[in-house]
Amino acid sequence: MSQRMDKIFDARNKTILSNAETLFRLKGFDKVTMNDIAKESDVAKGTLYLHFKSKEELLFNILIPKLEEFNHKVELIDKNENLIRNKIKKIITYGFDSDFFDFTKDHFLYMHKLFNVQYHNELNAIIDKVIKNFSLMIQEGKEKNEIKSSLPNNYLSHQLMHVFDPQIYFSLVENEKNTKESFVHNTINFYLNVLSLSDKGE
């Protein structure tokens, strides 16, 4: 494929992904068809299948950049903040405002489709990067004596990732009619307490 054709293919890829994401948000993943996406993207259905073989592949390719951006932001916060308390507060606050969380929340019922053999390894590899960054951050906090918890770093880092589980958000915010702000505030305090830190700045 020539360089020009590569650019055309990549541009069409981006258009298809953007249109698919819009349709998934507006109609719901289960109600959108590949034909809908082809029509919205102004391409033949056969052309669409040259780019993406299924809705699941589209869902995966929409999610991955959002997850990578989340990990990048975690790394920036870790680099730019000194105190573990501030790192945790910023990571949790950012996390609930991120495209990654919004997308997983909106498509929570269909995320399991990505944890099959075809997508499982690549998705888990990126999640593992996030968790490793959390673990390194927690280890540094222990070495600086900011974190008093004796719980294993691996456990603490997995629990930090778990706070972004959309099901918890649905249960405590959307179903119970709590505000997002109070939920984020309580989540920060909860996790600081898990680390045996107290949020004295609030």
Image (cartoon, rainbow, N blue to C red):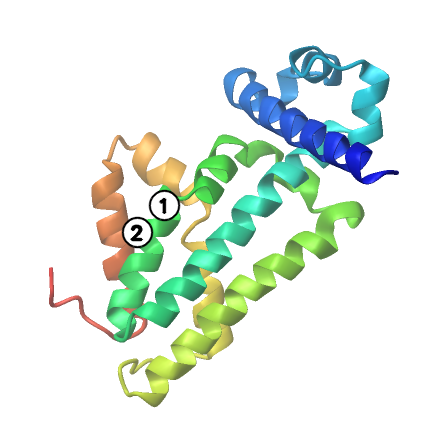
Q: Residue at x 79, y 46 (%)?
A: 118
| Residue 4 spot, x, y in % from top left | 78, 34
Above or below — where is 135 with respect to 22? Answer: below
| Quarter the C terminus occupies | bottom left
Q: Quadrant of the N terminus?
A: top right
Q: Nearer the viewer, residue 4 or 73?
A: 4
Q: CA distance from mark 1 to mark 2?
A: 6 Å
The image shows residue 139 at horizontal and vertical percentages of 42, 82
Residue type pointed to by label 1:
Phe
Question: Badge 2: how crowded within 10 Å, few (<14), some, or many (20+)?
Answer: some
Residue 18 spot, x, y in % from top left: 59, 27
Answer with left or right where residue 48 lies relative to residue 60. Answer: right
Image quarter of residue 128: bottom right
Q: Is residue 93 left or right of residue 76?
A: left
Residue for point 45% across, 69% down: 134
Describe residue 102's horizontal placement relative to residue 194 as left or right.
right
Confirm whether residue 7 shows in the render.
yes
User: Residue sitting at 36 percent across and 64 percent down?
Assistant: 77
Q: Are marks 1 and 2 in contact (CB under 8 Å)?
A: yes
For the question of whether residue 150 can be seen, the reply is no
Give me the disc on residue 93.
2
**Residue 86: horizontal and vertical position, in percent?**
25, 66
Q: Label 1: which residue?
A: 96
Which of 130/65 is in front?
65
Q: Secondary structure at mark 1?
A: helix
**SS at circle 2:** helix
Q: Amino acid at mark 2?
A: Thr
Quadrant of res 87? bottom left
- In the rendered image, the vertical position of residue 142 relative to residue 31, given as above or below: below
Image point (23%, 36%), residue name: 179
Image height check: is 92 above or below 145?
above
| Mark 1 neighbour class, 10 Å CA radius: few under 14, some 14 to 19, many 20 or more | many
